[in-house]
Amino acid sequence: MPVASAFPRQNFPTNPPSVISIETWRKIQAASFCLSARLISQYTEWDWHSSSFEFWPPSASLFESAAWFDINPAEDEEFPYIPEEHPKWDVILHALANKLVGVLGVRLRLFLMERGIDSWTYFPPTALTIPFSSFIELPPPFSFKSVEKFSTCHLQQMATPDFFVDGEWVGFTVYIGSSFSEEGQSWVRRVDSFESFGCDRIVRNPIQNTPGNDLVLEKKVKFKFVVWVDAKSFILESNWFQSHTTAHKLKLTIDSSTGIVEAVRRKYIMSIEVEERSTAVITPFGLVIGCKSGQWIWLWKCEWSSDS
């Protein structure tokens, strides 16, 4: 799988083969959850006011080597769709999403600390501010198939219409590493950039980018239930919500048995509405959407946000 630092930004690969067993990937998923819970929680308010703090050094390389992929039954993909491999792909995506939250959290907190932005936006949550016990039903340690059960123990509560509809969501779009230079017609290295959802101060009024200025935009993301597709899948739609630069709307088709989500994102670019489809994952830390190589969205419930 190509890493996130591969540019120009490309769509993710589909149906990648893996020689690692599904049992091993479940262990990796559990380990990545523990890693990320530690990473997003390692800095307290005291650290925020300290001039000597240092972020975990490997976080930068892990961030830039973040992997992702899509699952596609189409016959013309590079790798064939193998139905028997689908359950393993679901577990792999959960493992990758859990890991991504940790390194995203570190980079987001560094970004916010460096700019002193502590009053008008939402800091990423920590393991102390996320009420895991309210929606995770942990299997007894060392019990039969405890690792397998752990991999989906959050879905019974989280992968439901009520969980998404109840409350407001905030988060960030994250762009890793590079941008396009028109003068040189090439991709050049730059710092990572972050675009906030739910902030109280908007750098540019996104409604100016919408035809007729007739959209009702809100700062935070709110979901509404649309319909059950079948016994295990349902559709949600968000309001039109704003970031620093434009307007966004989400349509989520959620498989409640796996926590895998098809996310359709609508947004305005230069007054033109565009639509993009992505694979997303419901993690215990919120919703992670892989947009394109080097671009990610992490959404969490507003009340989970930490103070710093």
Image (cartoon, rainbow, N blue to C red):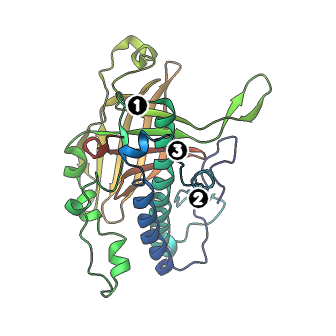
Tell me whether circle 2 and circle 1 mark residues in contact (CB < 8 Å): no
Q: Is residue 299 visible?
A: no
- How far apart marks 1 and 3 lie (CA) works out to 38 Å
Question: Is any atom of residue 240 visible in this view?
Answer: yes
Mark number displayed over residue 52 = 3
Q: Which of marks 2 and 3 is in front?
A: 3
Q: What residue type is labelled 2?
A: Thr
> What's the residue at 44%, 63% (across, down)?
94
- 64 in relation to 114, above or below: below
**Residue drawn at the location 49% of the way across and 72% of the way down:** 28
Q: Mark 2 points at which residue?
A: 14
> Which mark is first along the chain, 1 or 2?
2
The residue singled out by tag 1 in the image is 248
Query: Looking at this view, is 46 or 216 the one in front?
Result: 46
Q: In this view, does 144 lie above or below 216?
A: below
Q: Which amino acid does label 1 sit on?
A: His
